[in-house]
Amino acid sequence: MKTLAILSLLALAASPAMADMSVTIPFTAEIAGEALSCDNAYANLGSTAVSARILDFRLFVSDTNLISADGTRVPVQLDQDGAWQVGDVALLDFESGCANGTPQVNTTLRGSVPDGNYTGLEFEIGVPFAQNHADPTQAASPLNVTAMFWNWRGGYKFLKIEFAPEGMTEGSRGWLLHLGSTMCAAAEATDAPAQPCANPNRMTISLPGFDPALNTVVIDPAGVISGADLASNAPETSPGCMSFPNDSDCNTVLPALGLPFNDLPAASQQLVTMR
């Protein structure tokens, strides 16, 4: 019996561990179903059907999991590329040279998972609390992109989509959709909160049936802004919707992101689909 036990242990030790397989998860950005371009004016946007160009289109993704056939969530170990991915956080940048953006683009998540059969995708749009309120000037890329940062108290802009409506007056910043955590308790804007924010505003996205080899994640804000007037702004508030409580420009926007806002309940998120 002892000999059989020893042989069994030796066999287990000699058997190869489950191999990892590389995975690339493609994303694309669209406006009302049209491909994203800095040169295009997209018609019939928002509640007043204005035309608008894109100024910027970026977002952070974290906590990415593939869903196995039995429903198990399997974390994607992101490649640590020194540019777009660090830890389990990645920055997706869809615009190339728009007025408020950058020439560089990044439209995929790249990593590895144990070899297996996967039938779905889940991820968050946002930066985890532990990384969200650190000093971006000391952070590794892409968390050092200060254009995606509010301040230590608020943290990062998880989602940054900026529009220039037709007829925008000179000096106007446009109509801006910035999603980030709010109601974060800290004495000063330069202080990190010790406890999670009252409104974390991280979006959990679940895409059953997603196959990285066949499907693409589509980010399209047209449905999110369909109830917003891009041609005007609530008095004495930031331009567009920046997630801050009591900004009426967010009344239709955050619920359409699947998030509650003030006393308004969350609706089904209208930002992310797959094809």
Image (spheres, grey):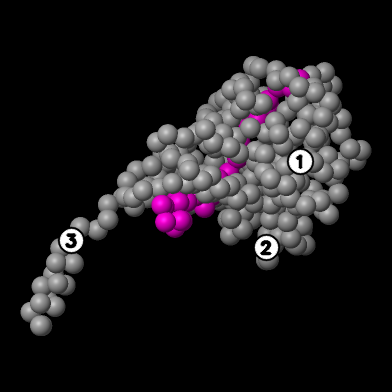
**Where residue 268 sits in the image (x, y, percent)?**
69, 45
Residue 169 point in image, percent of width and height:
84, 21
- As drawn, the residue found furthest toward the bottom would be 1
Residue designated by label 2: 196
Residue 15, numbered label: 3
Q: Earlier in the sequence, mark 3 or mark 2?
A: 3
Q: Where does the image place residue 264, in percent across and percent down from the top left?
A: 81, 51
The residue range painted magenta reads 51-75
- Describe the element under mark 1 as helix, strand or loop: helix
The tag on residue 253 is: 1
Q: Amino acid at mark 2?
A: Pro
From the viewer's side, name the closer residue of 190 and 149.
Answer: 149
Q: Residue furthest right?
A: 235
> Which numbered disc, 3 or 2, marks the residue closer to the eye?
3
Task: Work out whether residue 23 or residue 117 is closer to the camera in this orientation and state it.
Answer: 117
Residue depicted at 52% across the width and 49% down the height: 122
